[in-house]
Amino acid sequence: MAGAASLGLGSGAKVLAAPRAGKAKSVILIFNCGAPSHLDLFDPKPLATDTVRGEFATIETAVPGMQFTELIPDLAQRAGKLAVVRTVHHTHGGHNSGMAWSIVGRPYKMDSTLINPAPSDYPSFGTLVGWLAQRDGYSGSVPPYVITPYPHCDSTVYITPGQYGGCLGVRYDPFVLDADPNAADFKVRNLGLVDGLTRDRFEERQSLNQRFTERGQPIVASLAASHDVFHARAASMVYSGDAARAFDLSQEPAEVRERYGRHSWGQSHLLARRLVEAGVPFVTTVNGRSIIWDTHEDNFNRMKKNLVPPMQKAYVALLDDLEERGLLDTTLVVWMGDFGRTPMINKKAGRDHWPQCYSVVLAGGGIRGGQIVGASDSIGGVPKDRPVTPADIHATVFAALGYNSREITFHTVDGRPTPLSEGEPIRELL
């Protein structure tokens, strides 16, 4: 069973062998598939015409001069913790390619929604943080990169490239929950020994399997190597029991679960907090299965009634809970989507795709909150000053974790050394 030792079989320790200078130890990515409107949340335009401004009033936040919309008053109260980057931009308008550019920091080879992951993909920054953690000696029972509740995707048919191992290999695939943590019968399958199987018998079976593997004819094939990786990972997670405990939301008091919201997003955020406490370096919470934030029609009602309330409740609970537990200083929370939405409201009271300018919000992990980075133009259409790319966001995340994203490289499928990010850290944030 190749790889069992390196994946920490039988060990619940969370160890990073190489100390880093960064203040952040873990990252939680809140990703809104389908792309929320920046104009209706973090970058309001109160002086624009109503064909741009929309229905939501602009409100002051706890930070003088920083304004949000009336949709997020609870976040406005916590603006001192938030750094809002209002000038993020790229050029892919398809959902999957837009999501890929946002999480990978590089353009996909085509601008399309009808695409799926491939072994040649550039890895996302979540994948790379997991790769770095394993390189640095991570030995936790939970894989170092977890996605909850479902992967980034469009219509559950077209899965966003980049979020898996890609060119790094299946060893660095995330653990995707692929289940609703708010379900009454929620339980991550196969994370414990089956009834009647003791730890001694489990070890005997693993030892027997190892002897068969060593004495048998080796199979030289990528699928065989992948099988070894997944076998080792599964054995590690089952053996220690730590993984099952980390995913067990029933251990949380009812009032805590209510605080996050008894819905998939809320319980995913709570699960992210538990995983960070267990030492997991990168957790993605996907706010909505498929492209639920794709508001081409009825943008304002959908955001007000369905989309923003659970998002805000879960987001606020996560920030407050991390702070109360002394984890916010070492946990970087990043909020983003595929792209932004059009300044002009369409005939169906909706906003369409707009990668030319959108907002990303960061908090915790040593980030300097209470500030706006960059400014969009008068209608939120393009950056007016301090343009920022997804690659710059990633370089900032790596810097917060203590990594120099230009000096550390990985290899693509053709053997080329490639830096973690080709962007520059946003120094105002660090």
Image (cartoon, rainbow, N blue to C red):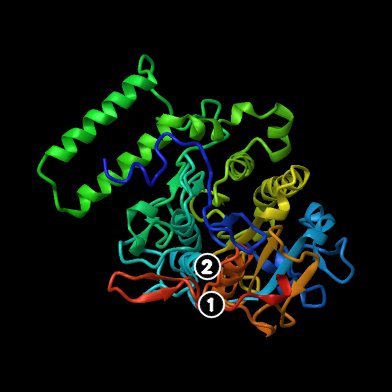
Residue 354 in view, yes or no: no
Q: Nearer the viewer, residue 369 or 88?
A: 369
* Figure check: 397 above or below 91: above
- Sequence-first tag of 2 and 1: 1
- Rendered residue at 68%/54% (across/down): 330
**Image quarter of residue 364:** bottom right
Residue type, mark 1 in image? His
Element marked by disc 2: helix
Q: Residues within 10 Å of mark 1 (few under 14, many from 20)?
A: many
Give left or right: position of 249 versus 149: right
Mark 2 near mark 1, Cβ–Cβ under 8 Å?
yes
Does residue 376 appear in this view? yes
Name the residue furthest right.
Answer: 64
Q: Is residue 96 left or right of residue 312?
A: left
Which label number is shown at residue 15? none
Position in image of residue 359 (x %, y %) = 66, 69
Residue beneath disc 2: 102
Residue 221 drawn above or below residue 347: above
Q: Where does the C terminus fall, quadrant-wise?
A: bottom right
Report the residue marked by disc 1: 90
Spatial CA distance of label 2 from label 1 is 8 Å
Taking 168 as reference, is 326 above or below it?
above
**Structural crowding at the residue carrying mark 2, measured as other residues with C-alpha within 10 Å and reported as few (<14), some (14–19) or many (≥20):** many
Identified by mark 2, the residue type is Ser
Residue at image position (72%, 33%) is: 256
Disc 1, SS: loop
In percent of width and height, residue 233 lies at 37, 41
Report x, y in % for residue 90. 53, 77
Give the left or right position of residue 68, taking residue 167 as reference. right
